[in-house]
């Protein structure tokens, strides 16, 4: 890649990652703060169990986002009761964009691609966890654009993550997916 990404005007090319992309996916995961992307076993599982989308700029993988299907994911309701994302479902996860590519539309392109696929592969419930800060419902500063995007796309806050980050768990039921 030449020059700083922040100055770039060519949109990222988003496509489904395959096993052939494992090395680039591993390199991106090594730079990520998300535990779901740091483990080689988890990355391989994401590639085999669901769909992983990659955003490329000048041939370099600068971001990724995944979705899995029929994952019984635990989360906490406002009253701290544990709930489980009902199956069948689509679970959206593991979105990461390199810091140098943030603010350039890469995350939005990845999110839009996931929503396009959701229109083709209907599931009655869709859940997405937004990275938190360790306090229930608190959102990591780098995850705020993702929160805004999903709320505008018809998701609502259903609770918070049972993971240590405790970020919001957004849920969308079929028929409430807005076009972005």
Image: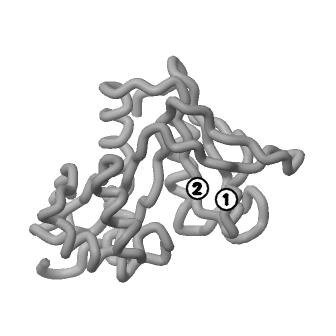
Question: Is residue 154 visible to us here?
Answer: no
In this view of the protein, which residue sits in the foreground, 63 or 101? 63
Judged from the image, the secondary structure of the residue bearing numbered disc 2 is loop
Q: Position of residue 97 (x, y in %)?
A: 37, 67
Residue that carries the numbered disc 2 in the rendered image: 130
Q: Colour mode?
A: one colour
* Residue in view at x 38 percent, y 36 percent: 115
Lateral position of residue 12 relative to residue 93, left or right: left
Q: Residues within 10 Å of mark 2 (few under 14, many from 20)?
A: many
Q: Nearer the viewer, residue 115 or 68?
A: 68
Whether tag 2 and tag 1 are in contact, CB under 8 A, the answer is: yes
> Which part of the image, by quadrant, shows the N terminus?
bottom left
Query: Circle 1 sits in a helix, a strand or a loop, which is it?
Result: loop
The answer to whether 125 is drawn above or below residue 141 in the figure is: above
Q: Residue 142's x, y, as percent?
A: 53, 67
70 versus 110 height, above or below: above
Q: Could you say where residue 55 lies in the image, as x and y percent from the top left?
A: 24, 59
The picture places residue 3, in percent across and down from the top left corner, at 17, 81
Residue beneath label 1, please?
Answer: 167
């Amino acid at each position: 890649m030449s020059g700083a990404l922040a100055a770039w005007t060519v949109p990222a090319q988003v496509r489904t990652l395959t096993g052939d992309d494992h090395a680039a996916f591993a390199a991106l995961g090594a730079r990520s703060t998300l535990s779901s992307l740091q483990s080689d076993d988890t990355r391989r599982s994401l590639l085999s169990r669901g769909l992983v989308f990659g955003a490329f700029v000048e041939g370099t993988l600068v971001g990724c986002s995944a979705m899995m299907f029929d994952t019984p994911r635990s989360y906490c309701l406002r009253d701290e009761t544990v709930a489980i994302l009902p199956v069948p479902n689509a679970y959206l996860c593991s979105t990461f964009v390199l810091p140098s590519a943030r603010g350039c539309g890469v995350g939005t392109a990845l999110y839009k691609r996931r929503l396009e696929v959701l229109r083709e592969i209907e599931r009655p419930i869709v859940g997405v966890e937004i990275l938190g800060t360790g306090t229930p419902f608190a959102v990591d500063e780098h995850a705020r654009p993702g929160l805004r995007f999903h709320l505008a796309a018809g998701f609502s806050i259903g609770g918070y993550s049972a993971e240590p980050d405790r970020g919001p768990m957004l849920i969308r039921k079929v028929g409430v997916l807005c076009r972005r």
